[in-house]
Structures are given as structure tokens and as C-alpha cells.
Image (cartoon, grey):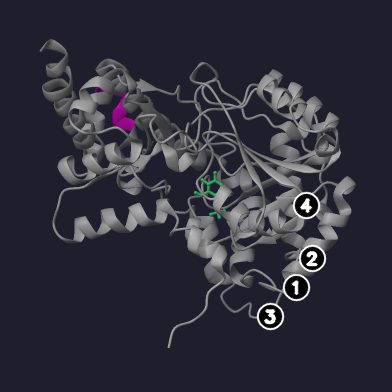
């Protein structure tokens, strides 16, 4: 017997990030030495206070309100007020089983075409497709570190018919960004906000990497300039290194209270509420943030060290790379080696990713998974393949040895991956240039 399946799913495949993770893990189990740049999972232990709160609340077995544990909603609102100066209160907060599920539910409820900038997270478009939504990919450029500009959005909106211009649309922005590691410039967000207001665009601002920011960069948000039309999402997965806890948050402004009410109905008919012990653990994470912020800042400095190192190496090799500003990623572009890659039969980002995995045991993700054209020879590198606890324990060594030495000793998979890539580029690609 075979089951008749909703045909919208047949247009999709398993999420590419999860698929590459399984493929790389399988190769590892087979004994191959894999350098895993394919999957962005924070490698650090969860802060002790959070795990302790989880175990102390293991007996919390009652269903909680669908919108979330009231104390947690309050703590989340306070956290966003204190850390980012947002004006949400506890009645604007929803707790979900990961921000991915909240994004799906928001997209389900919000009418209108979904606008996605090139260089956006892999799941936005498949989610919209599953929900039967029309999507449009907005072009971005390397000179802007692949952030969407107001000019591009304005140009797109002006090209719509007058009826379409007045219909609601949804734009998903993500800063700090996966796959590029870029942060939206504040002045551009201000201009984007004006266009969103003018053309009836509701913004979902995916801020799951907020606070994973490097050097003198600061996280900023379109929510400052367009609070009435912006929904902010976040959660425990990235900054708090707790992806497996599956806890996400959404902040829906008062002006969109009908959406908030609709979400509560949808939650009540779908996941009911997030696991109670996990919500108590999250209550510690958000409520006692000051107790763990130094620890989290240290984790972010380690991300920065690894990512700056990879960025410098890419630049040395002549591979184009986005400027690292935050999150766990870099987008690298092999276009300067296009001719040599063509000679080897590599013409697409998938072919490049496949080659690196099969021939060099380096797992990456093809740029086309992030909505870049398939023939743009770019890859996303997730730079998290190291033992976070070990690195934390030895991070002080960075002051006494060179970054290169530190990476080779404490992040050997990253070091090996970059060394393999360098050897291949210098021996085979640069060699081709000489011929
Ligand atoms: C940009 C972005 N948004 C959302 C998510 C989903 O996070 P969560 O674990 O909260 O579902 C991820 C996870 O990789 C992500 O990279």
C-alpha cells in the first residue's frame, strides 16, 4: 500500500543543512577525516545555570499556556528591553519549539507574497512553498556584503502593479546573517523601513544571532525604525548554544495584535505549548542573563577568532569572502578561479560543494541553497567544527601563541580543512593559471 501525499512536499527535499550534517557524520563514522564546514551548531557547553534550571524543573509536568510561561514571557520582554532597547512587553511575546516553527506559523498566517533577499537562510523559501505562498528573491551584491539595499527593494516595489503595491507583503530580514556573517547597516535599515511602510510590507526580522557580533560591530534592527510592522524572532539555539532544547521566541508588536491572537489559536491547535522544563531553563537564560553574559561573550570571541582566521586565509588564497561581522558563517566565492574550475568540469556551486566533499573530505553548503544563482561559484562555510569546551579551557593561550598555532592546536579540523583547501587551490587551481 502506498500513501497519497500532499503534492507540495514533492517539490522539496530534506533541509540541505540537516542533510549535509548527516552525510558528513556518516563519513566520520566510516573513519574518514572530515572537516565539517557544513552545519552551524554552536559547539560550546550550555551555561551551567541553564542546565541546572532544567534539572531542577524536571518535575514540571503540567501543560503551560500556549503563548508561554508568563514569567518567561516577562523575562524575554525585559531582556530585549535591556539588551536592545526594544519596547515590547510580556503580552507581545510568544514561546515556540524553536524559532523555525514560529517562522512557519507566522508565514502560515500572514497573507501576501514572501520577499527573500539573496543570501538568506535555507528554510525560508521551502517553508513559504509548503504553505503555497508566492515568493520573490531580491538580488543582493557583494559590495554590500550581500545585505538587501533600500534601492533594490524600492525598485522591486515600484515594478509591481498598483494593486500589488497596496497588497500586504512579507519581507524576511536576517541580521547577523546566515550564510554571509554580515550585519545590516543601521542607515540602510532606516531606509528599508520607509519603503516597507510605503508599500505595506510586514517584516519578520530573524535575530537568532543577535549578540553573536564581532569587534566593534553592533547589532541593530529594523524594529527601531518600523516597530509597528516588525516581528522579531530569536531563541536559545545560537547565542545560548542550545539548539537541541528547541525553544524560540517571537515578539509581535501591539499594532499587529490580530496576528498575535491568531498565533495563539494556531498554537493551541498545533503544538499546544513548549516543554515545561525547557521553558524554566529559558527563564534562567533570559531572566538571569547578567549571570551568564560574560561566558557568552567569551564564546563569541572564540567564534570571532576562528572566523577571522578563515577569512584571512581565504583572502590570502585569492578566494573572495564576505567580511565577518557576526554569526557563525562566511560566504566564499571561487569566481576568480572560474576558468580553472570549468576545466575540471565544475560549473555550479553544487558541483563545487560535491567535489570538495568527495575529493577533499571538506563539507560545505552550495551557495544556491541560499538563493544565489546556481552558476555563482560560492559556498557557505559554517565555522563551528571544534570542541567548544576544550577551546574555552585553553582560550587564554591566544595571548601567548599566534592565532595560526592556536587554531592548529585547538581547532584541528578547521586547521586541516583550510590547509587541505589551500593545498588544492595552490597546487591545482593556481597551477592552471600558470599554464
Ligand atoms: C538564520 C536562522 N534562522 C532560524 C534558525 C532556526 O533556529 P531555531 O533553532 O530557533 O529553530 C536558524 C538555525 O540554523 C538560522 O540559522
**What percent of the width, then of the height, locates residue 316?**
27, 16
Q: Nearer the viewer, mark 2 or mark 4?
A: 4
Q: Earlier in the sequence, mark 2 or mark 4?
A: 4
Callout 1: few (<14), some (14-19), or many (20+) C-alpha neighbours within 10 Å?
A: some
Q: Earlier in the sequence, mark 2 or mark 3?
A: 3
Q: Earlier in the sequence, mark 1 or mark 4?
A: 4
Q: Give the labeled residue for mark 2.
A: 264
Name the secondary structure under disc 1: helix
Q: Nearer the viewer, mark 1 or mark 4?
A: 4
Which of the 4 image quadrants contains residue 416? top left
Using the numbered discs, state the Cα–Cα distance from disc 2 to disc 3 in whole angstroms. Answer: 18 Å
Using the numbered discs, state the Cα–Cα distance from disc 4 to disc 3 in whole angstroms. Answer: 34 Å
Q: Give the labeled residue for mark 1.
A: 268
Q: Give the labeled residue for mark 4.
A: 111
- Viewer-closest of 367 and 28: 367
Image height of 280 relative to 107, above or below: below
Residue, far front: 161
Question: What range is drawn magenta here?
Answer: 396-402
**What percent of the width, then of the height, locates residue 176?**
56, 34
Question: Within the magenta stretch, is there residue 88?
Answer: no
Using the numbered discs, state the Cα–Cα distance from disc 2 to disc 4 in whole angstroms. Answer: 17 Å
Q: Earlier in the sequence, mark 4 or mark 3?
A: 3
| Mark number, residue 62 | 3
Count of picture labels: 4
| Mark number, residue 387 | none
Amino acid at each position: 500500500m502506498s500513501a497519497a501525499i500532499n503534492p507540495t512536499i514533492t517539490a522539496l527535499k530534506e533541509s540541505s543543512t540537516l542533510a549535509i550534517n548527516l552525510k558528513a557524520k556518516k563519513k566520520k563514522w566510516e573513519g574518514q577525516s572530515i572537516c565539517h564546514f557544513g552545519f552551524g551548531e554552536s559547539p560550546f557547553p550550555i551555561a551551567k545555570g541553564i542546565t541546572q534550571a532544567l534539572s531542577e524543573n524536571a518535575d514540571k509536568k503540567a501543560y503551560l499556556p500556549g503563548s508561554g510561561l508568563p514569567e518567561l514571557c516577562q523575562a524575554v520582554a525585559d531582556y530585549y528591553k535591556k539588551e536592545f532597547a526594544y519596547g515590547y512587553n510580556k503580552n507581545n511575546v510568544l514561546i515556540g519549539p524553536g524559532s523555525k516553527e514560529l517562522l512557519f506559523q507566522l508565514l502560515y498566517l500572514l497573507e501576501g507574497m514572501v520577499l527573500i533577499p539573496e543570501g538568506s537562510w535555507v528554510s525560508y523559501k521551502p517553508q513559504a512553498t509548503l504553505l503555497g505562498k508566492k515568493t520573490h528573491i531580491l538580488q543582493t551584491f557583494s559590495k554590500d556584503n550581500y545585505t538587501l539595499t533600500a534601492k533594490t527593494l524600492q525598485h522591486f516595489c515600484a515594478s509591481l502593479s498598483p494593486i500589488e503595491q497596496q497588497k500586504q507583503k512579507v519581507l524576511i530580514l536576517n541580521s547577523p546573517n546566515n550564510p554571509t556573517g554580515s550585519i545590516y547597516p543601521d542607515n540602510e535599515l532606516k531606509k528599508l523601513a520607509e519603503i516597507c511602510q510605503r508599500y505595506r510590507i510586514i517584516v519578520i526580522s530573524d535575530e537568532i544571532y543577535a549578540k553573536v557580533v564581532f569587534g566593534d560591530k553592533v547589532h541593530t534592527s529594523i524594529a527601531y525604525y518600523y516597530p509597528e510592522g516588525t516581528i522579531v524572532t530569536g531563541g536559545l539555539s545560537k547565542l545560548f548554544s542550545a539548539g537541541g532544547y528547541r525553544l524560540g521566541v517571537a515578539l509581535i508588536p501591539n499594532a499587529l495584535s490580530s496576528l498575535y491572537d491568531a498565533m495563539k489559536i494556531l498554537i493551541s491547535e498545533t503544538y499546544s505549548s513548549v516543554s515545561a522544563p525547557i521553558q524554566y531553563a529559558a527563564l534562567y537564560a533570559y531572566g538571569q542573563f547578567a549571570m551568564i553574559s560574560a561566558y557568552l561573550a567569551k564564546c563569541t570571541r572564540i567564534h570571532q577568532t576562528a572566523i577571522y582566521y578563515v577569512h584571512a586565509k581565504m583572502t590570502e588564497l585569492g578566494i573572495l569572502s564576505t567580511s565577518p561581522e557576526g554569526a557563525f558563517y562566511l560566504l566564499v566565492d571561487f569566481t576568480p578561479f572560474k576558468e580553472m574550475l570549468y576545466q575540471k568540469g565544475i560549473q555550479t556551486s553544487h558541483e563545487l560543494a560535491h567535489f570538495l566533499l568527495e575529493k577533499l573530505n571538506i563539507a560545505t553548503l552550495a551557495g544556491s541553497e541560499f538563493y544565489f544563482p546556481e552558476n555563482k561559484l560560492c559556498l557557505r562555510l559554517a565555522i563551528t567544527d571544534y570542541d567548544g569546551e576544550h577551546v574555552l579551557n585553553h582560550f587564554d593561550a591566544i595571548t601567548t601563541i599566534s592565532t595560526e598555532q592556536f587554531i592548529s592546536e585547538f581547532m584541528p579540523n578547521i586547521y586541516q580543512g583550510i590547509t587541505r583547501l589551500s593545498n588544492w587551490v595552490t597546487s591545482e587551481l593556481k597551477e592552471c593559471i600558470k599554464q
